[in-house]
């Protein structure tokens, strides 16, 4: 079990961000420093900004594109790839959908398939911490 404090990007706002590193399953190239990922129980899958795939030298199969609808009802396309994720003291292989449309302040989103199905997550806003096991 790992406890991570909520991030406070502005006064009175608490975000469930967790440090994450991704790795290329084929070349074993891994991000040298963690990037904050938003834990989003409303996201069906995990998303990553396309520039992270470029940096990791992950070859995205443009035939493997899927359309999604964001919370603001805007549609966007993302390309699926398997990556190694390093989070909360664990590492495992899961699918991420890489998209150009993620906001710059949120380059990684951890969703149901890929994160919640591999971890138990407890949001404890009262104590300002997230527990992952």
Image: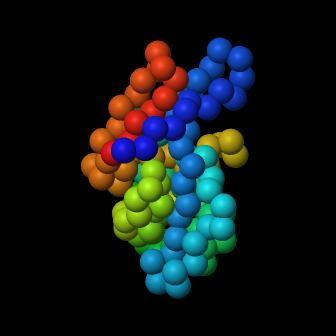
Horizontal and vertical percent position of residue 41? 38, 35
Horizontal and vertical percent position of residue 79? 47, 63
Image position of 5 with respect to 114: above or below: above
Q: Is residue 70 visible in the rendered structure shown here?
A: no
- Give the colouring mode of the picture: rainbow
Q: Which residue extends farthest bottom?
A: 27
Q: Nearer the viewer, residue 121 or 57?
A: 121
Q: Nearer the viewer, residue 55 or 30?
A: 30
So how many labels did they put on this image?
Answer: 0
Q: Is residue 125 visible in the rendered structure shown here?
A: yes
Q: Residue 105 falls in which quadrant of the image?
A: top right
Image position of 52 with respect to 123: above or below: below
Image quarter hosting the C terminus: top left
Q: Residue at x 62, y 53 (%)?
A: 35
Q: Nearer the viewer, residue 101 or 121?
A: 121
Say left or right for 40 vs 21: left
Image position of 113 with respect to 24: above or below: above
Q: Nearer the viewer, residue 3 or 29?
A: 3
Horizontal and vertical percent position of residue 119? 32, 47
Image quarter hosting the N terminus: top left
Q: Residue at x 52, y 81 (%)?
A: 28
Horizontal and vertical percent position of residue 103? 65, 43
Q: Residue at x 53, y 64 (%)?
A: 22
Q: Residue at x 37, y 65 (%)?
A: 92
Say left or right for 9 vs 73: right
């Amino acid at each position: 079990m790992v406890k991570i404090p909520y991030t406070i990007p502005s006064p009175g706002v608490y975000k469930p961000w967790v440090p994450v590193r991704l790795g290329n399953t084929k070349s074993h190239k891994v991000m040298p420093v963690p990037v904050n990922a938003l834990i989003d129980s409303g996201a069906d899958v995990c998303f990553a900004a396309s520039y992270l795939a470029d940096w990791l030298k992950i070859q995205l199969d443009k035939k493997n594109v899927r359309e999604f609808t964001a919370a603001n009802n805007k549609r966007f396309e993302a390309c699926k790839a398997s990556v190694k994720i390093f989070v909360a003291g664990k590492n495992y292989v899961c699918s991420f959908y890489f998209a150009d449309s993620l906001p710059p302040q949120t380059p990684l989103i951890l969703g149901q398939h890929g994160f919640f199905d591999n971890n138990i997550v407890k949001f404890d806003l009262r104590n300002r911490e997230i527990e992952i096991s």
